[in-house]
């Protein structure tokens, strides 16, 4: 290795690491958690250890072969261990980033806390997204939907912040569900401004609750990036769980003293609740994609398409940063995308406006 100590290496997230590497080894260090460790053998029968490393942005596989003095010690590292891995990193093609001449150490408790909060930029964006969700809920006009959303954030805010929007494909990271919901809320508000006949509060509440069952289906522990399989999520799925959660919150809300003032509101309480439940039940849009019912209201149709758009935009973003560049702005297809993707056409920025004369 170079004369530099590991602490002198620039510290990157795994996502940043992928973006800067080429065939020439470069010194970097990463803070990661070991998501899995498996003993394997090569085609010639030589042993090696395969470690899947994760942080809040990405994952990679580190293979330690029998010609490495680290083989014995890495075999003893249990899943969940948090380490710093410093190395000369190179792009190994289809195998992704490869650490050469690696050195590692355990992370301190303070370093673990920073790791679980994500990079400074990611942590900031997720805080802003959560604040946007909370502010949107506070601004709702319908008191029932407003208080329902606020009750949800009060009871499940911490769990909501940890959940992913998926195990793969889009927003598949700690806090990804908050990112997905906040961006969908921005899209829903924009569409509602174009189509004022939409029930804006209902649509925004539907955005908040459409994937709330993923707090069991796709959630992370308080101190970890390993997403366990939950029995309730496995047996029921996030749509039935979301329906059950909203019904429970609604019943609790109607037992509060403030609900007495809502009995004369039109539309009535039960009608509001069933329309919200319909948004949750129909947001996948098609039976073959797991929807128990098809969208049957304007808000349900808009929610389904906004959900689909945001998921696909996130998949494209990931594709541009992680897929192999085939040349001429063409990137290799990635799962589950059906084709290669092409660099989008940049827009011409608007000319600066002259200041108006007083």
Image: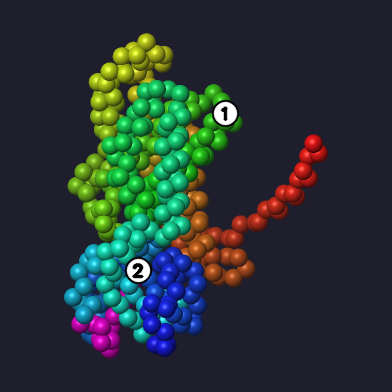
What residue is at 55 percent from the left and 36 percent from the top? 190
Is 61 covered by the magenta stretch?
A: yes
Is 46 covered by the magenta stretch?
A: no
Please name whichever residue, 32 or 230, is drawn nearer the observer in this view of the structure.
32
What residue is at 31 percent from the left and 59 percent from the top? 113
What residue is at 39 percent from the left and 63 percent from the top? 58
User: Magenta stretch?
Assistant: 60-72
Which residue carries the number 2 mark? 31
Q: Is residue 337 visible?
A: no
Task: Check the picture and name the quadrant holding the C terminus.
Answer: top right
Q: Secondary structure at mark 2?
A: strand
Furthest-right residue in view? 357
Q: Is residue 32 visible?
A: yes
- Residue 162 position within the rendered picture, expressed as x and y whole percent measured from the top left: 32, 50
Image disc number at residue 195: 1
Furthest-top residue in view? 264
Q: Earlier in the sequence, mark 2 or mark 1?
A: 2
What residue is at 78 percent from the left and 45 percent from the top? 354
Q: Secondary structure at mark 1?
A: loop
- Residue 63 position within the rendered picture, expressed as x and y whole percent measured from the top left: 31, 77
Determine which quarter of the picture holds residue 86: bottom left
Contact, CB < 8 Å: mark 2 with mark 1?
no
Q: Counting other residues with Cα less than 10 Å from the Cα at mark 1, is it few (<14), some (14-19), or many (20 or more)?
A: few
- Residue 114 position within the rendered picture, expressed as x and y whole percent measured from the top left: 35, 61
């Amino acid at each position: 290795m170079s004369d530099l100590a590991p602490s002198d290496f620039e510290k990157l997230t795994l996502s940043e690491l992928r973006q800067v590497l080429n065939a020439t080894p470069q010194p970097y260090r990463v803070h990661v958690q070991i998501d899995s460790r498996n003993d394997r053998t090569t085609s010639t029968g030589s042993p090696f250890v395969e470690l899947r490393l994760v942080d809040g942005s990405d994952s990679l596989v580190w293979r330690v072969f029998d010609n490495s003095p680290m083989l014995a010690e890495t075999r003893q590292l249990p899943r969940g261990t948090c380490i710093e891995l410093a190395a000369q990193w190179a792009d190994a093609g289809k195998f992704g980033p490869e650490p050469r001449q690696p050195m590692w150490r355990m992370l301190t408790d303070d370093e673990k806390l920073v790791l679980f909060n994500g990079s400074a930029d990611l942590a900031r964006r997720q805080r802003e997204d959560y604040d946007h969700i909370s502010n949107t809920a506070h601004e709702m006009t319908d008191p029932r939907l407003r208080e329902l959303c606020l009750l949800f954030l009060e009871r499940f805010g911490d769990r909501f912040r940890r959940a992913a929007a998926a195990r793969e494909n889009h927003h598949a990271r700690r806090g990804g569900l908050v990112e997905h919901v906040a961006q969908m809320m921005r899209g829903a508000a924009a569409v509602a401004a174009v189509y004022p006949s939409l029930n804006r509060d209902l649509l925004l509440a539907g955005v908040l609750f459409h994937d709330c069952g993923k707090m069991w289906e796709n959630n992370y522990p308080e101190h970890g990036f390993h997403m366990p399989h939950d029995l309730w999520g496995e047996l029921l799925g996030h749509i039935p769980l979301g329906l059950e959660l909203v019904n429970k919150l609604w019943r609790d809300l109607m037992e509060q003293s403030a609900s007495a003032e809502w009995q004369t509101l039109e539309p009535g309480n039960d009608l509001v609740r069933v329309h919200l439940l319909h948004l949750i039940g129909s947001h996948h849009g098609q039976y073959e994609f797991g929807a128990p019912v098809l969208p049957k209201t304007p808000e349900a149709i808009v929610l389904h398409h906004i959900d689909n758009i945001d998921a696909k935009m996130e998949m494209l973003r990931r594709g541009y940063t992680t897929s192999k560049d085939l040349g001429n702005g063409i990137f290799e297809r990635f799962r589950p995308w059906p084709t290669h993707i092409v660099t989008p056409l940049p827009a011409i920025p608007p000319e600066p406006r002259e200041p108006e004369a007083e």
